[in-house]
Image (cartoon, rainbow, N blue to C red):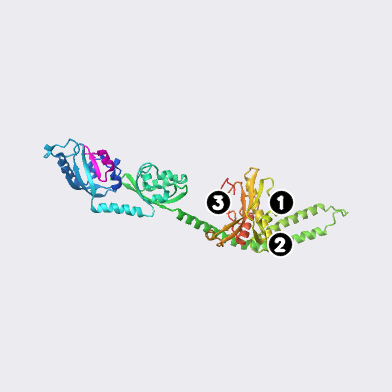
């Protein structure tokens, strides 16, 4: 019966041995004061009471030995070292009570005596209830935990349910801990930040991810501090957890927008520069090509008879003309990038246009990879067919180089056409270089199983003249494709990770 009382009583109960130390304390200490009863076992009862109240308690035990129950008021040391007023009843359990001991001076608790801390008085009880009410209404999870390896929870508000999907009782009963739910990548950094703050006796501020019961990851922001005893030892931690998933998402989106804005401004500046250079260079090329053609015309025919052999000169002129042609093509691409090239918009089927390019695309891929062309919902678009061909070819060449760099020799590239409908929310989420209108968009997707890209490369692949190929390529292809796509009111995005293709 006594065991059940100590386990389930709402009142705060102590059983004190003859040496004056606590034999046990009721489980209700956890709910009422946030104190783990196991931490009280073996502690002298006087250490828990205010020095001024200890003589009163001694007299109460004298009365208990005489078979009398006593009522008194005393102050109990709380979790923070504060003093909490209590109403106490003291009585004797067992056969140790001696009716003839009325005049006996008692300096320690009789064997088997039980001190019943009946209630927390007035304002303190109200304060405890108020704290619980406030904790349950905080937009997060308020906690109090022990300073042990698993940070055992003594109190945890209902807010933890929305963050983790688990009831607070699961953590209090130690069926689960927050450490069990923490993302593996965040464990070490979180531990270091926490230990550093506690070592400096400073409040801690942590950010990490917890796995929700639905399998998703939730970003959590934690604010807390340590609680120290009279010996300056860390006993408990208290704090609050807040779901920061939306905040992190917004901040990441803001950073992405800032990067895209900077890229857009850089592209605009480089476009103006490239356009000016390409225009002047085109004029120089025209003179060079014209001079080469005139030189070819002044040479005697191939079958002419004479003392001189002009065939080497003809070969040199042909190579020069071929190189000038490549330079002219690069200039044309730069003019298109700068928006100064001519565009001839026509309406045609996207799928048919891709099919018409099949031989050219297969030749570009060669034996590096197997090219597969797939078509989803048919659609027609209106643009310059030559510029669309340039866009597709640049992307396929980039994919081919990525597959070739992987060294497999049997890579795979998939080119897919389809229709992508965007509602208002989806369209509004794409802000740069300007918001899209809701509607149906032609989609061209190119997937490769090449080496993939890290974040640093992925953030720069559309920068003009950026290339990862040593002494190969101009780095203009993807930048030109990016500019042309956006000029037609579209968007180009990339999804890639090292070793996972793009």
Q: Position of residue 255 (x, y in %)?
A: 50, 56
Give the numbered dot on residue 359: 1
Residue at mark 3: 456
- What secondary structure is found at the residue carrying circle 1? helix
Which residue is farthest right? 305
How far is mark 1 from mark 3, CA to CA? 34 Å
> 443 or 410: which is nearer to us?
443
- The answer to whether one can see residue 81 in this image is yes
**390 with respect to 224 (left or right):** right
How far is mark 2 from mark 3, CA to CA? 37 Å
Quarter of the image with the N terminus in it: top left
| Among numbered discs 2 and 1, the one appearing first in the sequence | 2
**301 with respect to 274 (left or right):** right
Total marks placed: 3
> 163 or 334: which is nearer to us?
163
Q: Which residues are magenta?
A: 1-22
Give neighbour class at mark 2: few <14, some 14-19, many 20+ (Cα, 10 Å): few
């Amino acid at each position: 019966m006594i065991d059940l009382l100590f386990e389930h009583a709402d009142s705060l109960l102590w059983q004190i041995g003859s040496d004056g130390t606590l034999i046990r304390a009721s489980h209700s200490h956890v709910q009422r004061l946030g104190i783990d009863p196991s931490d009280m076992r073996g502690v002298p009862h006087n250490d828990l009471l205010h020095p001024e109240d200890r003589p009163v308690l001694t007299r109460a035990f004298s009365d208990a030995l005489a078979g009398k129950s006593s009522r008194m008021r005393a102050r109990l040391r709380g979790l923070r070292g504060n003093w909490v007023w209590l109403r106490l009843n003291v009585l004797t359990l067992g056969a140790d009570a001696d009716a003839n001991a009325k005049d006996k001076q008692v300096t320690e608790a009789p064997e088997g005596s039980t001190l019943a801390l009946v209630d927390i008085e007035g304002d303190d009880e109200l304060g405890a209830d108020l704290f619980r009410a406030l904790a349950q209404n905080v937009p997060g999870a308020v906690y109090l935990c022990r300073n042990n390896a698993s940070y055992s929870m003594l109190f945890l508000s209902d807010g933890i349910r929305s963050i983790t999907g688990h009831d607070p009782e699961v953590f209090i009963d130690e069926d689960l801990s927050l450490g069990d739910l923490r993302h593996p990548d965040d464990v070490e950094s979180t531990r270091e930040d926490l230990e550093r703050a506690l070592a400096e006796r400073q409040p801690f501020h942590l950010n990490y991810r917890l796995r929700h019961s639905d399998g998703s990851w939730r970003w959590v922001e934690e604010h807390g501090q340590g609680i120290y005893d009279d010996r300056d030892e860390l006993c408990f931690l208290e704090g609050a957890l807040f779901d920061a998933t939306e905040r992190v998402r917004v901040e990441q989106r803001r950073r992405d927008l800032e990067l895209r804005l900077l890229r857009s401004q850089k592209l605009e500046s480089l476009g103006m520069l490239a356009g000016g250079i390409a225009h002047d260079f085109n004029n120089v090329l025209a003179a060079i090509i014209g001079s080469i053609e005139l030189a070819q015309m002044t040479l005697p025919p191939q079958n002419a008879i004479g003392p001189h052999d002009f065939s080497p000169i003809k070969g040199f002129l042909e190579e020069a003309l071929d190189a000038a042609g490549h330079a002219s093509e690069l200039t044309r691409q730069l003019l298109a990038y700068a928006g100064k090239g001519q565009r001839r918009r026509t309406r045609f089927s996207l799928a048919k246009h891709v099919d018409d390019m099949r031989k050219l695309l297969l030749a570009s891929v060669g034996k590096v990879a197997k090219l597969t062309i797939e078509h989803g919902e048919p659609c027609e678009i209106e643009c310059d067919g030559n510029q669309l061909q340039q866009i597709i070819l640049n992307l396929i060449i980039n994919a081919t180089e990525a597959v070739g760099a992987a060294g497999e020799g049997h890579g795979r590239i998939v080119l897919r056409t389809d229709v992508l409908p965007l509602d208002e929310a989806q369209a509004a989420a794409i802000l740069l270089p300007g918001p899209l209108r809701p509607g149906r968009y032609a989609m061209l997707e190119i997937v490769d199983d090449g080496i993939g890209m890290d974040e640093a490369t992925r953030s720069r692949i559309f920068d003009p003249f950026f290339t990862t190929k040593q002494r190969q390529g101009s780095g203009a292809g993807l930048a030109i494709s990016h500019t042309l796509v956006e000029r037609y009111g579209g968007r180009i995005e990339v999804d890639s990770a090292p070793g996972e293709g793009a």
